[in-house]
Amino acid sequence: MSKKRIAVLASGGGTNLQALIDTQKRGELGNGEICLVVASKPGIFALERASSNGIPTSVLARKDYEDIASYSRALADLLVAENIDLVVLAGFLTIIDEQVYQAFPNRIINVHPALIPSFCGKGYYGLHVHEAALAKGVKVSGATVHIVTPECDAGPIILQKAVEVMEDDTPETLQQRIMEQAEWKILPKAVQLFCDDRLTVRDNKVYINDQGE
């Protein structure tokens, strides 16, 4: 069985990309292989992570396109041309439209640094998520891997992992703990489950099959 081709989309340092690369090196990415890293701007460290691990890269800079529609069309065309099976958003902060979702239905996943439906949706990204969680005084937060749909952070949930919030946490310390204890664990696991054909989407819910279908 040929491996499923994975594209990782990034806009920054690529820590979640690194978690996926490390998982692949350990042979734990199932029937998947990272075949392309797409950056939304040049010079980001995610590109270096990819290159140093022999993974092809492409830069699609948002500023080179006049609007979201033309950018989304170019991105969808690139991913289709590369025969990509799964698209992973790993800190990808550029808005894309339904052209990409329609080209890859139930085949785009994202990791969000909170337990959806808490602290998610428009405006909740990066440290803003953790600032909101601490302002609310929650005792646990965490991360969610979900399928991406046109509505922000509203797609079917694949995996979640809770992380304890400490009384002396800052947004930065909480962000780091959630990455280490949740994001870097459940994102590679979700990718592995997808690539091993163990995910079924039905009625806006994700069901995990014990064995591949």
Image (cartoon, rainbow, N blue to C red):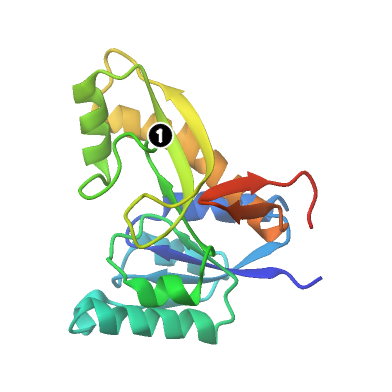
The quadrant of the picture occupied by the C terminus is: bottom right
Q: Quadrant of the N terminus?
A: bottom right
* Nearer to the camera, 159 or 6: 159
Can you say whether 56 is above or below 13 in the image?
below
The answer to which of 48 and 209 lies nearer the viewer is 209
Using residue 43 as the reference point, say whether residue 187 is left or right of it.
right
Q: Residue furthest top?
A: 167
Q: Residue at x 36, y 37 (%)?
A: 117
Work out whether residue 138 or residue 183 is closer to the camera in this orientation and state it.
138
Q: Residue at x 72, y 69 (%)?
A: 3
- Residue 99 quadrant: bottom left
Is residue 65 toward the left or the right of residue 85 in the image?
Answer: left
Percent across and percent down for residue 58 are: 42, 78
Q: At x 30% / y 73%, what residue is drawn?
A: 42
Question: Which type of secondary structure does the marked residue at label 1 adopt?
Answer: loop
Q: Residue furthest front?
A: 203
Q: Is residue 162 left or right of residue 21?
A: left
Q: Amino acid at mark 1?
A: Leu
Give above or below for 71 relative to 92: below
Callout 1: few (<14), some (14-19), or many (20+) C-alpha neighbours within 10 Å? many
Vertical side of 97 occupied by 83: above or below: below
Task: Pinpoint residue 154: horizontal percent, then vertical percent.
Answer: 38, 50
Q: Residue at x 64, y 56 (%)?
A: 194
Q: Position of residue 193 (x, y in %)?
A: 67, 51
What percent of the width, then of the height, locates residue 31?
73, 61
Residue for badge 1 = 115
